[in-house]
Image (cartoon, helix red, strand yellow):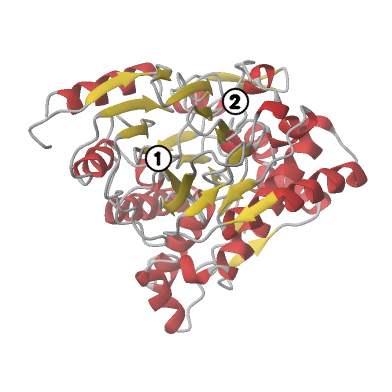
Amino acid sequence: MPNTSPNTSLNTSLNTDTLTVTHHGGYQTVTGSCHQVDIKTSGLRLLIDCGQYQGDDAREARVNLNGKRIDALILTHAHIDHCGLLPWLLAAGFNGPIYCTEATAALVPLLIDDTLKLQLNMDYGHRQRVIERIRQLTVTLPYNSWHRLKPKQKGQPATYLRLQPAGHILGSAYVELKLPDEQRVVFSGDLGPSNTPLLPDPTPPSRADILFLESTYGDKTHESVATRAQRLEAIIQRSLEDGGAILIPAFSVGRTQELLFDIEQLIHQKQLDDTLPIILDSPMAQKVTRHYRQFKKLWSKEAKTKLNQHRHPLAFEQCITIDEHSQHIALVNRLKQTGEPAIVVAASGMCQGGRIMNYLTALLEDKRTDVIFAGYQAQQTLGRDIQQGNQQVWIDNTPVTVNAQIHTISGYSAHADQNDLVNFVQGIQPPPKQIHLIHGEPDSQRELAALLRNP
């Protein structure tokens, strides 16, 4: 770290002569990211992300938002905890541009459509009208290019926006704002970890006077990519000796694709039986994976090399996709009755709905079952309850005994760990004058803040 430690604060709003930043969500937890930036010199009111809370926590940013007062929305990426409140923002009168990358623009309609269907049971016609309105307002921006934001009134000084690769999921970006006084304000969004095989590492900005930095894993370090693949293989091989299914709750965007990438590598290296069924039971994940293949230009060099070798790391023959709900139910019943080995990747990643719920209900009581958590489990989610070793959990108001073997592989996290976050800050020279830690639970933020203050 540089000798001059930035002023690092936790969860605080910001009010200076030039701007005010208000956190509507994502400031004492890892979900619900929603940050309002009021630029006093240009009169612009910007919203950085508009995400839903996940888990049983009922707090949601929409209660504090007046869409008519927001001039533009900037989306860092397509995860629901960063874009899921967009329909509510539209209903609250928002009519401004939605800035994001091209890949994010392709993914957001998929996830919003799924949210409206599952949470509101909205019919197809109504969902399509919402999605079409989102598409009409969306303005895609390339990485590493400044875009002039239109001031509120003619003659007012301009603010500029730039999106940079964040390495979190396909199309993810961190946000750079160049204010009229030339001050640079950076919102990290969710930063990806280093050295992952599918997406390039994020590169720190050349300048950030004020940095709003995520802190999801501010108190932890991840396993390496090599270690995660070794652990995945070891768990699979041990499970195959006992029989039974391996269940991997996975987010449709990001984690699923990383898992498929590593499983294909294990098969290619003949470390996994080429007859073992790899089951992707998530229609949403299937759609997202197709978009990952569509945007190959955003892949890392390693991933592109595999394509040049005529391998298909996200579309290999052994991967079986389950589409119809009837197929899903039949598979759940079959695995429960036979105990035959299979790897099942299914959403949702925090076990808060989706097809993984039926697998857990049917198979958690079977001691031959293995459950692998490959991503963050927020407080007050079923995933956290299972991960922390509860011997009994409640699913759909029914108690379920947990006899399955439970594993956590942190190397599959799509978030930067403590070392990655510190390195990101170190890469900004001169160092930021202020760092505000957001998108993290209190213990994680306190540990990261102490490290940044006392390098």
Q: Residue furthest front?
A: 155
Q: Which residue is mark 1?
A: 188
x then y, percent, for residue 228: 33, 50
Q: Nearer the viewer, residue 433 or 157?
A: 157
The disc placed on residue 452 is none
Residue name at image x 44 percent, y 22 percent = 389
Placement of the N terminus among the 4 image quadrants? top left
Q: Residue furthest left?
A: 3
Q: Which residue is mark 2?
A: 53
Q: Residue furthest bottom?
A: 309
Q: Nearer the viewer, residue 202 or 387?
A: 202
Q: Nearer the viewer, residue 28 or 390?
A: 28
The crowding category of the residue bearing disc 1, from other C-alpha atoms within 10 Å (few below 14, some 14 to 19, many at least 20), is many
Residue name at image x 55 percent, y 30 percent = 43
x then y, percent, for residue 350: 56, 33
Placement of the C terminus among the 4 image quadrants? top left
* Circle 1 or circle 2, nearest the eye: 1
The amino acid type, in three-letter code, at marker 2 is Tyr
Where disc 1 sits, the SS reads loop
